[in-house]
Amino acid sequence: MNRLVLGAQWGDEGKGKIVDILTEEADVIVRYQGGSNAGHTVCVSDKTFILHLIPSGILHPEKICVIGNGVVIDPKSFLEEKQTLEDLGIDIGERLLISEKAHLVMPYHKEFDARREAILGSSKIGTTKRGIGPAYTDKHARMGIRVCDLLNLEVLKSKIEENVKEINRLCELYEIEPFDAGKIFDEYRDYAEKLKPYIRNTVYYLNGVFKNKRNILFEGAQGSMLDVDFGTYPFVTSSHPTVGGAFTGTGLPYKALDSVVAVVKAYTTRVGNGPFPSELTNELGQKIRDKGAEYGATTGRPRRCGWLDLVVVKYAAMINGVDEIALTKLDVLDGLDEIEVCVGYEYEGKKIGYIPSQLEEFEKCKPIYKTFKGWDSTKGVLNYDDLPENARKYIEYIEWFVGVKVSIVSTGAKREETIRR
Ligand code: IMP
Protein backbone atom coordinates (compact mmCIF):
# COMPACT_ATOMS: atom_id res chain seq x y z
CA MET A 1 0.00 0.00 0.00
CA ASN A 2 1.51 3.32 -1.10
CA ARG A 3 0.13 6.27 0.82
CA LEU A 4 0.45 10.01 0.50
CA VAL A 5 0.14 12.24 3.55
CA LEU A 6 -0.62 15.87 2.78
CA GLY A 7 -1.94 18.93 4.58
CA ALA A 8 -5.53 19.99 3.89
CA GLN A 9 -5.20 23.49 5.34
CA TRP A 10 -2.40 26.10 5.43
CA GLY A 11 0.30 23.75 6.71
CA ASP A 12 1.16 22.91 10.32
CA GLU A 13 -1.68 20.36 10.48
CA GLY A 14 0.48 17.91 12.42
CA LYS A 15 1.69 15.89 9.43
CA GLY A 16 4.93 14.93 11.21
CA LYS A 17 3.14 12.75 13.73
CA ILE A 18 0.87 11.10 11.15
CA VAL A 19 3.78 10.38 8.82
CA ASP A 20 5.66 8.95 11.79
CA ILE A 21 2.78 6.57 12.57
CA LEU A 22 2.23 5.49 8.96
CA THR A 23 5.97 4.98 8.48
CA GLU A 24 5.57 1.73 10.44
CA GLU A 25 3.70 0.37 7.40
CA ALA A 26 6.15 1.70 4.78
CA ASP A 27 9.58 0.70 3.49
CA VAL A 28 10.55 3.96 1.79
CA ILE A 29 9.51 7.51 2.70
CA VAL A 30 9.87 10.28 0.14
CA ARG A 31 9.59 14.07 0.35
CA TYR A 32 8.46 15.52 -2.98
CA GLN A 33 8.31 19.32 -2.66
CA GLY A 34 9.25 22.33 -0.57
CA GLY A 35 12.51 22.66 1.25
CA SER A 36 13.72 23.66 4.68
CA ASN A 37 10.68 25.95 5.02
CA ALA A 38 8.88 22.88 6.43
CA GLY A 39 8.95 22.03 10.11
CA HIS A 40 7.70 18.53 10.96
CA THR A 41 7.55 17.95 14.69
CA VAL A 42 7.65 14.38 15.97
CA CYS A 43 7.61 13.39 19.67
CA VAL A 44 9.17 10.02 20.44
CA SER A 45 9.33 8.98 24.11
CA ASP A 46 10.67 12.07 25.87
CA LYS A 47 12.43 13.49 22.81
CA THR A 48 11.05 16.03 20.33
CA PHE A 49 12.48 16.09 16.82
CA ILE A 50 11.85 18.90 14.34
CA LEU A 51 12.62 17.92 10.77
CA HIS A 52 12.84 20.45 7.97
CA LEU A 53 14.27 18.68 4.92
CA ILE A 54 14.92 15.09 5.90
CA PRO A 55 11.78 12.89 5.83
CA SER A 56 10.47 12.07 9.32
CA GLY A 57 10.82 8.38 8.45
CA ILE A 58 14.50 8.70 9.34
CA LEU A 59 13.52 8.34 13.02
CA HIS A 60 12.64 4.69 12.35
CA PRO A 61 15.65 2.42 12.04
CA GLU A 62 15.84 0.51 8.74
CA LYS A 63 13.51 2.79 6.79
CA ILE A 64 14.92 4.37 3.64
CA CYS A 65 14.29 8.10 3.15
CA VAL A 66 14.40 9.93 -0.13
CA ILE A 67 14.57 13.65 -0.83
CA GLY A 68 12.88 13.73 -4.22
CA ASN A 69 13.62 15.84 -7.29
CA GLY A 70 10.78 18.27 -6.51
CA VAL A 71 12.46 19.45 -3.31
CA VAL A 72 14.81 22.45 -3.19
CA ILE A 73 17.80 21.68 -1.00
CA ASP A 74 19.81 24.11 1.04
CA PRO A 75 22.98 22.05 1.66
CA LYS A 76 23.90 24.10 4.73
CA SER A 77 20.54 23.51 6.35
CA PHE A 78 20.62 19.82 5.31
CA LEU A 79 24.03 19.23 6.90
CA GLU A 80 23.00 21.02 10.12
CA GLU A 81 19.86 18.89 10.34
CA LYS A 82 21.80 15.70 9.70
CA GLN A 83 24.26 16.64 12.45
CA THR A 84 21.44 17.39 14.91
CA LEU A 85 19.86 14.00 14.20
CA GLU A 86 23.18 12.21 14.63
CA ASP A 87 23.80 14.07 17.90
CA LEU A 88 20.42 12.79 19.08
CA GLY A 89 21.53 9.23 18.35
CA ILE A 90 19.78 8.69 15.00
CA ASP A 91 21.90 6.52 12.73
CA ILE A 92 21.45 7.77 9.15
CA GLY A 93 24.06 5.50 7.57
CA GLU A 94 23.03 4.69 4.02
CA ARG A 95 19.33 5.20 4.66
CA LEU A 96 19.13 8.62 3.06
CA LEU A 97 19.09 9.34 -0.67
CA ILE A 98 19.05 12.74 -2.34
CA SER A 99 17.79 13.14 -5.89
CA GLU A 100 20.44 14.35 -8.30
CA LYS A 101 17.68 16.27 -10.10
CA ALA A 102 16.70 18.31 -7.02
CA HIS A 103 17.58 21.99 -7.20
CA LEU A 104 19.92 23.72 -4.78
CA VAL A 105 19.08 26.72 -2.65
CA MET A 106 21.96 29.18 -3.04
CA PRO A 107 23.01 31.98 -0.66
CA TYR A 108 21.60 34.62 -3.02
CA HIS A 109 18.18 32.92 -2.94
CA LYS A 110 17.92 33.44 0.81
CA GLU A 111 19.15 37.01 0.57
CA PHE A 112 16.67 37.90 -2.19
CA ASP A 113 13.82 36.20 -0.33
CA ALA A 114 14.44 38.41 2.70
CA ARG A 115 15.05 41.56 0.66
CA ARG A 116 11.88 41.18 -1.42
CA GLU A 117 9.85 40.78 1.74
CA ALA A 118 11.43 43.93 3.20
CA ILE A 119 10.61 45.88 0.02
CA LEU A 120 7.01 44.64 0.02
CA GLY A 121 6.59 45.99 3.55
CA SER A 122 3.06 45.55 4.85
CA SER A 123 2.01 43.60 1.75
CA LYS A 124 4.75 41.02 2.24
CA ILE A 125 3.92 37.31 1.92
CA GLY A 126 5.43 36.45 5.28
CA THR A 127 7.80 33.80 3.90
CA THR A 128 10.10 31.67 6.03
CA LYS A 129 13.06 33.45 4.34
CA ARG A 130 14.60 30.08 3.48
CA GLY A 131 15.09 31.11 -0.17
CA ILE A 132 12.28 28.86 -1.39
CA GLY A 133 10.57 31.27 -3.82
CA PRO A 134 13.79 32.44 -5.52
CA ALA A 135 15.11 28.85 -5.77
CA TYR A 136 11.93 27.67 -7.55
CA THR A 137 12.00 30.83 -9.68
CA ASP A 138 15.47 29.92 -10.96
CA LYS A 139 14.38 26.32 -11.51
CA HIS A 140 11.51 27.40 -13.73
CA ALA A 141 13.59 30.08 -15.43
CA ARG A 142 15.94 27.20 -16.34
CA MET A 143 18.92 28.75 -14.64
CA GLY A 144 18.89 26.68 -11.43
CA ILE A 145 21.81 24.67 -10.12
CA ARG A 146 20.99 21.03 -9.44
CA VAL A 147 22.34 18.48 -7.01
CA CYS A 148 23.94 16.57 -9.92
CA ASP A 149 26.02 19.68 -10.66
CA LEU A 150 27.80 19.03 -7.37
CA LEU A 151 29.23 15.89 -8.97
CA ASN A 152 31.14 17.86 -11.60
CA LEU A 153 33.09 20.71 -10.07
CA GLU A 154 33.87 22.34 -13.42
CA VAL A 155 30.19 22.50 -14.30
CA LEU A 156 29.37 23.70 -10.79
CA LYS A 157 31.93 26.48 -11.01
CA SER A 158 30.77 27.74 -14.39
CA LYS A 159 27.08 27.60 -13.37
CA ILE A 160 27.78 29.55 -10.19
CA GLU A 161 29.74 32.14 -12.18
CA GLU A 162 26.96 32.50 -14.78
CA ASN A 163 24.28 32.82 -12.12
CA VAL A 164 26.20 35.25 -9.96
CA LYS A 165 26.84 37.47 -13.00
CA GLU A 166 23.11 37.74 -13.57
CA ILE A 167 22.26 37.98 -9.87
CA ASN A 168 24.75 40.79 -9.33
CA ARG A 169 22.96 42.88 -11.94
CA LEU A 170 19.82 42.53 -9.84
CA CYS A 171 21.74 43.29 -6.65
CA GLU A 172 22.13 46.88 -7.75
CA LEU A 173 18.39 47.19 -8.23
CA TYR A 174 17.61 45.55 -4.90
CA GLU A 175 20.35 47.41 -3.03
CA ILE A 176 22.12 44.25 -1.94
CA GLU A 177 25.90 43.79 -1.75
CA PRO A 178 27.08 41.87 -4.84
CA PHE A 179 27.95 38.19 -4.42
CA ASP A 180 31.40 36.66 -4.86
CA ALA A 181 31.18 33.63 -7.17
CA GLY A 182 34.54 32.29 -5.97
CA LYS A 183 33.45 32.31 -2.34
CA ILE A 184 30.16 30.56 -3.16
CA PHE A 185 32.01 27.96 -5.22
CA ASP A 186 34.41 27.23 -2.33
CA GLU A 187 31.48 26.80 0.03
CA TYR A 188 29.54 24.53 -2.35
CA ARG A 189 32.65 22.48 -3.24
CA ASP A 190 32.83 21.59 0.42
CA TYR A 191 29.11 20.69 0.46
CA ALA A 192 29.62 18.58 -2.68
CA GLU A 193 32.14 16.44 -0.81
CA LYS A 194 29.76 15.99 2.13
CA LEU A 195 26.61 15.34 0.07
CA LYS A 196 28.19 12.98 -2.45
CA PRO A 197 27.52 9.75 -0.53
CA TYR A 198 23.77 10.45 -0.57
CA ILE A 199 23.29 11.55 -4.19
CA ARG A 200 21.42 9.07 -6.40
CA ASN A 201 19.20 8.88 -9.44
CA THR A 202 16.14 8.54 -7.23
CA VAL A 203 13.74 8.40 -10.19
CA TYR A 204 15.07 4.97 -11.14
CA TYR A 205 15.51 3.98 -7.51
CA LEU A 206 11.89 4.80 -6.59
CA ASN A 207 10.50 3.09 -9.66
CA GLY A 208 12.47 0.00 -8.69
CA VAL A 209 10.92 0.14 -5.22
CA PHE A 210 7.47 0.42 -6.81
CA LYS A 211 8.13 -2.46 -9.20
CA ASN A 212 9.27 -4.65 -6.33
CA LYS A 213 5.99 -3.90 -4.54
CA ARG A 214 7.65 -2.40 -1.48
CA ASN A 215 5.58 0.21 0.34
CA ILE A 216 6.14 3.88 -0.36
CA LEU A 217 4.98 6.76 1.83
CA PHE A 218 4.88 10.18 0.21
CA GLU A 219 5.45 12.92 2.79
CA GLY A 220 3.86 16.21 1.80
CA ALA A 221 5.06 19.47 3.30
CA GLN A 222 3.07 22.72 3.82
CA GLY A 223 -0.62 22.46 2.90
CA SER A 224 -3.08 22.52 0.00
CA MET A 225 -4.01 26.16 0.64
CA LEU A 226 -0.33 27.08 0.18
CA ASP A 227 -0.14 25.38 -3.23
CA VAL A 228 1.12 27.81 -5.88
CA ASP A 229 -1.82 26.92 -8.18
CA PHE A 230 -4.64 26.01 -5.81
CA GLY A 231 -3.89 28.06 -2.71
CA THR A 232 -4.53 31.67 -1.74
CA TYR A 233 -2.19 33.06 -4.39
CA PRO A 234 0.05 35.06 -4.01
CA PHE A 235 0.07 34.19 -0.29
CA VAL A 236 1.33 30.70 -0.99
CA THR A 237 4.59 28.82 -1.20
CA SER A 238 6.27 28.22 -4.56
CA SER A 239 5.73 24.45 -4.83
CA HIS A 240 2.89 21.93 -5.14
CA PRO A 241 1.99 20.44 -1.76
CA THR A 242 -1.07 18.91 -3.45
CA VAL A 243 -1.29 15.43 -4.95
CA GLY A 244 0.14 16.36 -8.35
CA GLY A 245 3.40 17.40 -6.74
CA ALA A 246 3.91 13.84 -5.57
CA PHE A 247 4.32 12.67 -9.16
CA THR A 248 6.33 15.54 -10.62
CA GLY A 249 8.42 15.61 -7.45
CA THR A 250 9.42 11.93 -7.50
CA GLY A 251 9.12 10.57 -11.04
CA LEU A 252 6.71 7.88 -9.86
CA PRO A 253 3.60 7.28 -12.00
CA TYR A 254 0.10 7.97 -10.68
CA LYS A 255 -0.50 4.24 -10.44
CA ALA A 256 2.09 4.16 -7.68
CA LEU A 257 -0.39 5.86 -5.34
CA ASP A 258 -3.07 3.81 -3.56
CA SER A 259 -4.39 6.20 -0.94
CA VAL A 260 -4.36 9.90 -0.08
CA VAL A 261 -4.49 10.77 3.61
CA ALA A 262 -5.32 14.40 4.34
CA VAL A 263 -4.18 15.73 7.68
CA VAL A 264 -6.75 18.13 9.12
CA LYS A 265 -6.21 20.00 12.36
CA ALA A 266 -9.35 20.22 14.53
CA TYR A 267 -9.11 24.01 14.13
CA THR A 268 -7.30 26.20 11.60
CA THR A 269 -3.97 28.01 11.71
CA ARG A 270 -1.92 29.92 9.22
CA VAL A 271 1.50 31.59 9.38
CA GLY A 272 2.28 34.54 7.19
CA ASN A 273 -0.17 36.86 5.52
CA GLY A 274 -3.25 36.22 3.39
CA PRO A 275 -6.98 35.69 3.86
CA PHE A 276 -8.24 33.51 6.71
CA PRO A 277 -12.02 33.92 7.12
CA SER A 278 -12.42 31.93 10.36
CA GLU A 279 -9.51 33.62 12.14
CA LEU A 280 -9.98 34.46 15.83
CA THR A 281 -8.14 37.64 16.68
CA ASN A 282 -9.49 37.66 20.24
CA GLU A 283 -8.55 36.08 23.57
CA LEU A 284 -9.86 32.71 22.45
CA GLY A 285 -7.47 32.73 19.50
CA GLN A 286 -4.62 33.35 21.94
CA LYS A 287 -5.87 30.55 24.20
CA ILE A 288 -5.83 28.09 21.29
CA ARG A 289 -2.37 29.35 20.26
CA ASP A 290 -0.96 28.71 23.72
CA LYS A 291 -2.70 25.41 24.33
CA GLY A 292 -1.85 24.10 20.88
CA ALA A 293 1.73 25.49 21.02
CA GLU A 294 0.98 27.25 17.77
CA TYR A 295 4.35 28.83 17.18
CA GLY A 296 6.25 28.10 13.94
CA ALA A 297 8.54 25.04 14.09
CA THR A 298 10.85 26.70 11.55
CA THR A 299 10.63 30.40 12.37
CA GLY A 300 9.13 30.51 15.89
CA ARG A 301 6.49 32.97 14.62
CA PRO A 302 3.10 32.91 16.40
CA ARG A 303 0.57 31.20 14.13
CA ARG A 304 -2.76 32.88 13.41
CA CYS A 305 -5.50 30.67 14.92
CA GLY A 306 -9.20 30.21 14.17
CA TRP A 307 -12.09 27.77 13.91
CA LEU A 308 -12.08 24.78 11.61
CA ASP A 309 -13.00 25.86 8.09
CA LEU A 310 -14.73 22.98 6.36
CA VAL A 311 -15.06 24.85 3.06
CA VAL A 312 -11.27 24.72 2.94
CA VAL A 313 -11.11 21.04 3.92
CA LYS A 314 -13.77 20.04 1.40
CA TYR A 315 -11.87 21.90 -1.33
CA ALA A 316 -8.64 20.13 -0.36
CA ALA A 317 -10.47 16.78 -0.41
CA MET A 318 -11.76 17.56 -3.90
CA ILE A 319 -8.50 18.64 -5.52
CA ASN A 320 -6.45 15.86 -3.92
CA GLY A 321 -8.92 12.98 -4.22
CA VAL A 322 -8.63 12.38 -0.49
CA ASP A 323 -9.43 8.84 0.73
CA GLU A 324 -9.01 9.29 4.49
CA ILE A 325 -8.71 12.11 7.00
CA ALA A 326 -6.32 12.14 9.95
CA LEU A 327 -7.77 14.61 12.45
CA THR A 328 -5.14 16.12 14.73
CA LYS A 329 -5.01 18.14 17.94
CA LEU A 330 -8.60 17.39 18.92
CA ASP A 331 -7.53 17.66 22.58
CA VAL A 332 -6.61 21.34 22.09
CA LEU A 333 -10.36 22.06 21.87
CA ASP A 334 -11.05 20.26 25.18
CA GLY A 335 -12.89 22.26 27.81
CA LEU A 336 -14.58 24.80 25.55
CA ASP A 337 -18.32 25.42 26.06
CA GLU A 338 -19.00 25.85 22.39
CA ILE A 339 -17.05 25.20 19.21
CA GLU A 340 -17.78 26.84 15.87
CA VAL A 341 -17.16 25.31 12.47
CA CYS A 342 -17.16 27.34 9.27
CA VAL A 343 -19.56 25.73 6.77
CA GLY A 344 -19.86 28.48 4.16
CA TYR A 345 -19.10 32.13 3.51
CA GLU A 346 -21.17 35.25 3.14
CA TYR A 347 -19.97 37.34 0.24
CA GLU A 348 -21.75 40.62 -0.52
CA GLY A 349 -24.91 39.36 1.14
CA LYS A 350 -24.91 36.02 -0.67
CA LYS A 351 -24.09 32.62 0.80
CA ILE A 352 -21.32 30.83 -1.07
CA GLY A 353 -19.78 27.41 -0.53
CA TYR A 354 -16.61 27.72 -2.60
CA ILE A 355 -13.25 29.44 -2.36
CA PRO A 356 -13.07 32.46 -4.67
CA SER A 357 -9.98 32.68 -6.88
CA GLN A 358 -9.80 36.45 -6.54
CA LEU A 359 -8.02 37.29 -3.34
CA GLU A 360 -9.97 40.52 -2.99
CA GLU A 361 -13.20 38.51 -2.96
CA PHE A 362 -11.91 35.89 -0.54
CA GLU A 363 -10.74 38.64 1.81
CA LYS A 364 -14.31 39.97 1.99
CA CYS A 365 -15.82 36.56 2.80
CA LYS A 366 -17.38 36.31 6.26
CA PRO A 367 -17.60 32.86 7.83
CA ILE A 368 -20.98 31.18 8.32
CA TYR A 369 -20.73 29.04 11.43
CA LYS A 370 -22.44 25.94 12.76
CA THR A 371 -22.16 25.74 16.55
CA PHE A 372 -21.24 22.53 18.37
CA LYS A 373 -21.41 21.83 22.09
CA GLY A 374 -17.97 21.36 23.67
CA TRP A 375 -16.67 18.40 25.65
CA ASP A 376 -14.52 17.82 28.73
CA SER A 377 -11.50 15.85 27.66
CA THR A 378 -10.25 13.79 24.74
CA LYS A 379 -6.63 13.91 25.90
CA GLY A 380 -4.89 10.58 25.39
CA VAL A 381 -8.13 8.69 24.54
CA LEU A 382 -7.21 5.55 22.58
CA ASN A 383 -10.59 4.17 21.47
CA TYR A 384 -13.12 5.99 19.35
CA ASP A 385 -16.03 4.84 21.49
CA ASP A 386 -14.36 6.29 24.60
CA LEU A 387 -14.45 9.81 23.17
CA PRO A 388 -17.06 12.15 24.67
CA GLU A 389 -20.29 12.07 22.68
CA ASN A 390 -19.95 15.71 21.59
CA ALA A 391 -16.44 15.07 20.26
CA ARG A 392 -17.79 12.14 18.24
CA LYS A 393 -20.58 14.38 16.90
CA TYR A 394 -17.92 16.91 15.84
CA ILE A 395 -15.92 14.22 14.00
CA GLU A 396 -18.96 12.68 12.37
CA TYR A 397 -20.10 16.08 11.13
CA ILE A 398 -16.70 16.59 9.50
CA GLU A 399 -17.06 13.22 7.79
CA TRP A 400 -20.56 14.06 6.59
CA PHE A 401 -19.65 17.54 5.32
CA VAL A 402 -16.46 16.53 3.54
CA GLY A 403 -17.66 13.09 2.48
CA VAL A 404 -14.47 11.39 3.68
CA LYS A 405 -13.93 9.05 6.62
CA VAL A 406 -11.85 10.22 9.59
CA SER A 407 -9.67 7.14 10.01
CA ILE A 408 -7.13 8.53 12.47
CA VAL A 409 -7.75 10.85 15.42
CA SER A 410 -4.81 12.31 17.31
CA THR A 411 -5.52 13.05 20.97
CA GLY A 412 -2.07 14.20 22.07
CA ALA A 413 1.43 14.87 20.78
CA LYS A 414 2.84 11.44 21.60
CA ARG A 415 2.90 8.55 19.09
CA GLU A 416 0.68 6.46 21.38
CA GLU A 417 -2.01 9.14 21.80
CA THR A 418 -3.79 8.09 18.63
CA ILE A 419 -7.09 6.45 17.66
CA ARG A 420 -7.09 4.26 14.50
CA ARG A 421 -10.53 3.43 13.11
P1 IMP B 1 7.91 30.25 1.79
O1 IMP B 1 7.52 28.84 1.55
O2 IMP B 1 9.02 30.39 2.78
O3 IMP B 1 8.18 30.99 0.51
O4 IMP B 1 6.66 31.00 2.46
C1 IMP B 1 5.44 31.23 1.74
C2 IMP B 1 4.24 31.05 2.65
O5 IMP B 1 4.14 29.68 3.04
C3 IMP B 1 4.30 31.83 3.96
O6 IMP B 1 2.99 32.21 4.33
C4 IMP B 1 4.83 30.83 4.95
O7 IMP B 1 4.49 31.14 6.27
C5 IMP B 1 4.13 29.58 4.45
N1 IMP B 1 4.84 28.34 4.80
C6 IMP B 1 5.95 27.84 4.23
N2 IMP B 1 6.28 26.67 4.81
C7 IMP B 1 5.36 26.43 5.74
C8 IMP B 1 5.14 25.34 6.65
O8 IMP B 1 5.86 24.35 6.71
N3 IMP B 1 4.04 25.45 7.46
C9 IMP B 1 3.19 26.50 7.39
N4 IMP B 1 3.35 27.52 6.56
C10 IMP B 1 4.43 27.49 5.75
Image (cartoon, rainbow, N blue to C red):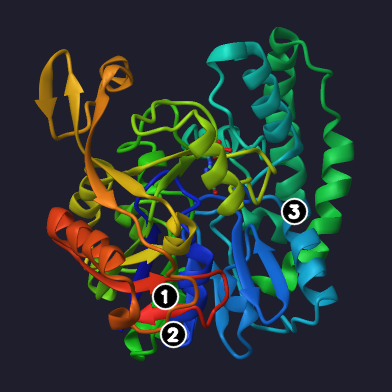
Which residue shows up at 46% across the image and 43% down it?
A: 269
Cα gap from disc 3 to disc 2, whole angstroms? 26 Å
Cα gap from disc 3 to disc 1, whole angstroms? 23 Å
Query: In this figure, which residue is indicated by the disc labeled 2?
Result: 26
Viewer-proximal residue among 412 and 265: 412
Dot label at residue 77: 3
Label 1 secondary element: strand
CB under 8 Å between discs 1 and 2: yes
Up the image or down, 370 lies above or below 397; here it is above
Q: Position of residue 180 (x, y in %)?
A: 86, 30
Three-letter code, disc 1: Leu
Viewer-proximal residue among 273 and 74: 273
CB under 8 Å between discs 3 and 1: no
Q: Position of residue 272 (x, y in %)?
A: 54, 31
Label 2 secondary element: loop
| Residue 98 image-quadrant placement | bottom right
